[in-house]
Image (cartoon, rainbow, N blue to C red):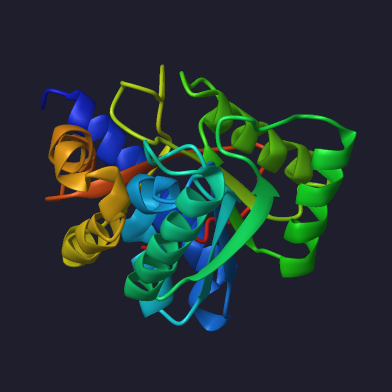
Amino acid sequence: MEDITRRKVLYGAGALAAAAWSSAAGAADRRLKVIVVGAHPDDPESSCGGTMARYADSGHEVVALYLTRGEAGIPGKTESEAAAIRTAEAQRACSILKARAVFAGQIDGKAEINDQRYGEFRSLVEKERPDVVFAPWPIDSHRDHRVASLMAYDNWERGGRRFEFYYTEVDLGDQTKNFQPSHYVDITAVVERKRQACMAHESQDPPSFYGRYHEPMQRLRGLEYGCQAAEAFAGMVQNPKRCSLPG
């Protein structure tokens, strides 16, 4: 009997489920609205920039929803100076990925969870009317990432679970903890565009982190899925009975 390896199990489960659900949904026959939530400029790009590119290349509308403008992200700059620089970088990154940037109005390092903030975030998402939403995995060492995760999850619950909801991994184990993927997307054909989008965030010195965290992450997920480079996601069991991830 053939040995059943972890790679084969993961590949078989992820690939067969995605193929079957995508076929049932007929996702290729309609234009989707996809929102990728991140706490800071560069979070959506580094966590699932390849998937964003694949959606956009297939004609779907992709929105990067940034919780903050990265106000605390540049030493020696005021909050307003840093926000202006990082907003421009986010716009450049989105242009590379063929996405649109939206900002939720919270402050880097001071992200809040309260009724007002939940309402503001929910209004933004409801205005967009998404079919698919991605958000950071909630077990994360960065408080802003946890806030972004809870904001998105609350919207999914209060909105009646109408859209597909998937968690992303921000990096390979340094901030994202205990991540267990259920779905994969092959990003081999667009991995260079993802890298360029991350490199657009020049103020964050991307050469210092991209090769350390993100290239190993996408190689590992590629090995699990059976391709050169992949991004991994954890989907909610209660998602609508379809899967609109790129095949």
Q: Nearer the viewer, residue 11 or 127?
A: 127
Above/below status of 124 relative to 57: above
- Residue 151 found in image quarter: top right
Q: What's the residue at 39%, 50% (across, down)?
A: 42
Above/below status of 147 relative to 227: above
Q: Nearer the viewer, residue 163 or 38?
A: 38
Q: Nearer the viewer, residue 234 or 191?
A: 191
- Residue 24 found in image quarter: bottom right
Left or right: where does residue 103 sit relative to residue 94? right
- Residue 45 found in image quarter: bottom left
Q: Residue 65's x, y, as percent?
A: 58, 56
Q: Nearer the viewer, residue 4 or 27?
A: 27
Q: Residue 118's x, y, as percent?
A: 81, 40
Q: Residue 58's x, y, as percent?
A: 40, 78
Which image quarter is the C terminus in?
bottom left
Q: Residue 80's x, y, as percent?
A: 55, 51
User: Is residue 240 in sight in this rendering?
Assistant: no
Left or right: where does residue 112 sit relative to residue 235? right
Q: What's the residue at 45%, 82% (across, down)?
A: 59
Left or right: where does residue 208 sit relative to residue 44? left
Q: What's the residue at 21%, 43% (across, down)?
A: 218
Above/below status of 97 relative to 140: below
Which image quarter is the N terminus in?
top left
Q: What's the residue at 28%, 28% (across, down)?
A: 172
Left or right: where does residue 117 sit relative to residue 141? right
Count of marks placed on residues: 0
User: Is residue 198 in sight in this rendering?
Assistant: yes
